[in-house]
Amino acid sequence: MGNGLASHAQVTAQRFPGATLDWPATLRERRSRPLAPAHLRWRQHFGQLHSLHVFALDCSGSMRESGAFAQAKGLLLQWMRWAYVQRTPVALLCFGASQVQWRLPPRRAPQWNADLIEPLPGGGGTPLAQALHAAWALMSRRAEERKTLWVLSDFRSPDVLSLVRQHPPLRLRHVLVDGEVPARASHRVFGGAQRLVQAWPGAVRITANG
């Protein structure tokens, strides 16, 4: 995030202690434009924090081969740093190579996120449905009022075909960070994120490359 955005955020934090950045509202306002201070949307909290952000990172081979994995890790690192500054509880779930693993249980974001995120390996298949069900199960047990699931993936998984027929838990917000690369001679676009957004009311799709 540029210096202008950082300065704007710092002024807001000083004027309104306890305010946290509302990323889904900010991204909806930004649309496809470069992120600017005018797009930032804030939520004021009083007393105990009532938000939880769960990040599900696709570590599959297709993500690594396309370059989307490195890009997603960069975005995740940036968002986790903001979560630390805002004292917002987060959790990190990684899925790939037919495995799902919680790398960070729900807690306040750690100060040094690079040590957690940069060494993450990539490869193997995409157990998307297993990852989403694990995230839904954990978030359904949590007491926070506002819970957002961020899924950073290329969504190139046959699981999408069954997930579009399922109903995610109520009161969970979904932000699908689509890392699928554009079509080319050897690559046909699957459009998994777009299919899920069309099937899940309230879900938001953004592209990983802005």
Image (cartoon, helix red, strand yellow):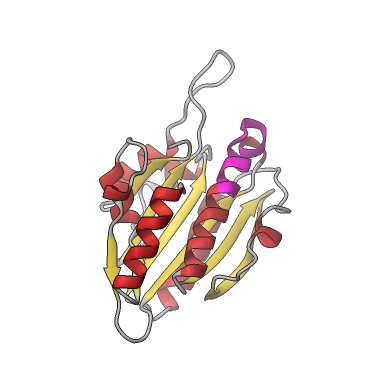
Q: Is residue 63 visible?
A: yes
In terms of image quadrants, where is residue 196?
top left
Q: Where residue 186 appears, x then y in whole percent?
A: 59, 16
Give the residue displayed 39% in from the left and 51% down from the top.
5
Give the residue displayed 58% in from the left and 37% down from the top.
68
- 207 in the magenta segment: no
Quadrant where the C terminus is found in the figure: top left
Q: Where residue 49 appears, x then y in whole percent?
A: 38, 80
Considering depth in this image, is 38 or 160 the residue closer to the camera? 38
Q: How many marks?
A: 0
Q: Is residue 86 above or below residue 207?
A: below
Q: Where residue 69 appears, x then y in whole percent?
A: 61, 42
In-image side of 113 versus 178 (left or right): right
In-image side of 160 versus 59 (left or right): left
Q: Is residue 203 visible?
A: no
Q: Is residue 42 above or below residue 165?
A: below
Give the residue displayed 34% in from the left and 76% down from the top.
17
Q: Where residue 25 appears, x then y in whole percent?
A: 28, 55
Which residue range is magenta in the image? Answer: 63-74
Give the residue displayed 60% in from the left and 45% down from the top.
126
Which secondary structure class fits the magenta region best? helix
Considering depth in this image, is 177 or 102 the residue closer to the camera? 177
Q: Is residue 183 above or below residue 6?
A: above
Residue furthest to the bottom in view is 47
- 72 in the magenta segment: yes
Considering depth in this image, is 121 or 42 the residue closer to the camera? 42
In-image side of 84 versus 120 (left or right): left
Considering depth in this image, is 86 or 199 the residue closer to the camera? 86
